[in-house]
Every structure is written in structure tokens, then in C-alpha cells.
Amino acid sequence: MKPLVAIVGRPNVGKSMLFNKLCGQRLSIVEDTPGVTRDRLYAQCEWRNRTFDIVDTGGIEPGTDDQILAFMREQAEIAISTATVIVFVCDIKTGMTASDQEVANMLLRSGKPVILAVNKADQTGRENPDIYEFYNLGLGDPIAVSALHGHGTGDLLDACFQFFPEEEDEEEDDDVIKVAVIGKPNVGKSSLVNRILGEERVIVSNVAGTTRDAVDSAFENQHGKYLFIDTAGMRKKSRVDDRIEKFSVLRSTMAIERSDVCLIMIDAQEGVTEQDTKVAGLAHEAGKACIIVVNKWDAIEKDGKTMDKMRQEVMRDLSYMTYAPIVFISALTGQRVDRLFELINYVNDQSAMRITTGMLNSVLADATARVQPPTDKGRRLKIYYMTQVGIRPPHFVCFCNDARLFHFSYQRYLENQIRSTFGLEGTPVRLTVRQRSDKEE
């Protein structure tokens, strides 16, 4: 597992801005009103050749009646409980407050290593004497940082780094395929995991939302080694009123991030709902290998065309995922559950496929000969060459003379050509267009 750094503190001390500065992307919405960051946000960072996860939490307001603030506090508590290191952010402009002291006491009780970052120390040069009062929190030496300008962030990451566990050799873990079972509540995710494991590992009940946490279960059979992550169901945002539910959505998102393959479960009786498209969209956006699993197939009245009809409906509603294989199962009776393993292995291999530049360019030459690249105002798109830069999902870069001419439909055409030649079934494909400057030409 990668180390996890949690950024906590009371509202409006600049946690999100610090988070954005550390991960180098504007992922958190930054606003000068308390309570803008409601959910925990995750991003990956790298420092001193170690990758780690960083999480931005909503502000902790210790004794609050306001429901959203209380919810944010619970959010932060969850982040704290899973973190390797906690960065506690205070604000030098407001000075140390009673709330800071309460949060500090809560962090001390957690027993986790805590690093104190005093934000908004924006001027450089001599140290601001106001920083000394933060020694009263009992959390050791405060580190002055400016999330706005980036001062002190290196010292802060160095301080976090010393608490990271030794890097484990992930060799033995390499052959384990991590499978996230995702879908809306009550679609049979836990029943499927129990059917595979052959034991009641996960609580199953007909009440939607029984599974609150993402549960990991290791499993091995003749097909290989697997780690099944049974996630809590994701509901529509408007229905997410119960605070525990909100955590479930976040944890499911985390489970997708951790997985290699996602099993997207759909209820055969209901067909594809709007919620299913959202859940599938998360896996698609994360670039994970996917299998669409239509469950409760035993409860459907069938004739000769039922399966084809359902397959067409799924393809129509999840039109952005036509690459994902569809399998019809019943977790209750065990029908076709065994087929899942071969499919999981297959899509996992497909998402890790590497294609040589030579082979790619012969496909490219063939594709451009068949369908001419688009022109605009007399200027034709020229594609020089294409190369693969990443796997999981396969990521290709196209070098061309003018990126503006590279129309989306032509990108899709090239993607389809690559798929028809190399398969790449069950995995999304990323295509990046790079423009060569005239100097390079």
C-alpha cells in the first residue's frame, strides 16, 4: 500500500490550496468561504522518488451543530484513521485558536505522526515571530508554509517522508489481480463475492446499503490469485442524505483507484439505470479494465432473444464503454460465475498490453491511407508517427503538424483501427495529440 498523507485543520486555513500546490493540479475547489471542500479528495504525489497518496479533507469544526460541518468532521476522522502521516494546517494570520487546540488534541489521541504546518506565512526573508505561539499545541516544531507561493512545501514533504514505511518489494504482489466489484446498492455485489469465496464473508441483506466499507478478500484458484474489493453501492447524489452513505461513495471511488479490473454490476430486472451509467463512468474515467456483469439473470423470463436484447440495451446505454465484455450471471445460483475468472485475466492482460512503435505505425499508415486525415482552410492534418507511452490503460501519443486539425471523430477512428488490429478488449484507450513545433520540423 502507498503511504497516505492527510491534510486536516479547521475550515478556511488553506488546506485545499496547499493540497493543490503539493499535487500540482487544481483538483480542490478553492474558495474563501469555510466549508467549500465537503468530501475528501485524493491525488497522487511524488517526492524523493516515492509516490504516495495525499488527501484533502473538509475542515474540522470541533463542537459544531451544523450538519455539513459535523459531516466534514467525520470525513476528516475517516481520513485520519487511514492516514500514514497527518499534516495539521493552521493559519498564521488568525493565530492559534481554541478550535486549533481541540483539533490538535483529537490528532494527538489518534496516535498517528502529526506534522504542524502554519500556512499563509507569505512573506519571505525573516521568520514571522507569530509562529512561536503554535508551539503551545504540543505538536513539535511548526513548519512555516505558504500554499499561495509554495514556500516551505519542500520542508513539509521532507518531514512527512521520514514517517513513510520502508518501500516493500511488490514483486510477490504482482501476480495478484485486484478486482473492484462496483454498482448501485442492492444489485448483488456482496452476494457475488460470497459466491466466489464460498463463505459468508460479507453481510448480505435485502436492505440496500448493508455494505458500508470497501471490504478486501483474497482468493486463489486454478485461474490465478485475486483480491476482491466489495464496495458499498453508489447512489444518486440527491439520495445521499445519510452521512454514512456519503463515505460509501468516496470509498467506492477509492476502491476503483486501487483496482486493476472493475466488475460493473447491473440488475437484470431493472436494466441500466442512470445511476449505473454514473458508476460505470467512474471506472471508465479512471482508465480501468472493465467487465459488465448483469446479475439476477435467473429471475428473468427468457425466450431465445432475451440475452441479445439485453446486450443491445446495455450497449446503447453505456455507449462510451462498447469495449467492455458483457456477462450474464446469477450470484444466487452461481450460474456462469466461473466464467468471470477467465474474463478478468483476459481484460487485465489486455489493459497491460504493449504494442511496438513499428506495429503501431504500420496500422497508422494503413488507417490514414484508407481515410484521409481532415483538412481545414486548405491545411491538411499530417500525422508523423504514433507511439505507446503507458499501460493500464494503454496510452498512445500521436505527433502531428497541427493539433487543432486533429478532429475528435478522427481520433475515434484511429482508436477503432487500433482496437480492430490489436484487440484491447475490456480496456479504455487514451490518445494524446502532440503538436510538433515548426522549428522541430
Image (cartoon, rainbow, N blue to C red):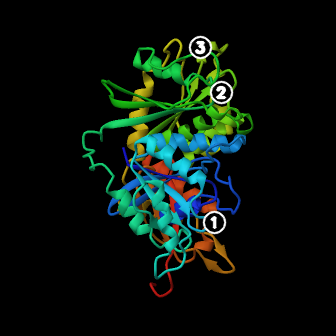
Residue closest to the far bottom: 439
Distance between the alpha carbons at the discs numbered 2 and 1: 33 Å
Q: Position of residue 291 (x, y in %)?
A: 51, 35
Q: Earlier in the sequence, mark 2 or mark 1?
A: 2
Q: What residue type is labelled 2?
A: Met
Closer-to-camera residue (33/428): 33
Q: Residue at x 60, y 62 (%)?
A: 410
Asked if 392 appears above or below 309 in the picture, the reply is below
Q: Please name the residue shown 46% across and 76% down the image.
A: 127
Q: Please state the horizontal and vertical placement of residue 134, each as a whole percent of the image.
A: 49, 61
Left or right of 389, for residue 173: left
* Disc 3 residue crowd, few under 14, some 14–19, many 20+, Cα 10 Å: some
Asked whether 213 or 225 is in front, the reply is 213
Q: In which quarter of the image is the N terminus?
A: top left
- Position of residue 201 measured from the top left corner of the image (x, y, whole percent): 44, 18
Q: Are marks 2 and 3 in contact (CB under 8 Å)?
A: no
Instruction: Describe the element under mark 3 as helix, strand or loop.
Output: helix
Residue behind mark 3: 298
In the picture of the structure, the residue carrying the numbered disc 1 is 407
Residue 94 visible: yes
Q: Where is residue 380 in the image (x, y as percent from the top left)?
A: 60, 76
Q: Hey, which quadrant is residue 62 in on the image?
A: top right
Q: How far apart are the alpha carbons under marks 1 and 3?
A: 45 Å
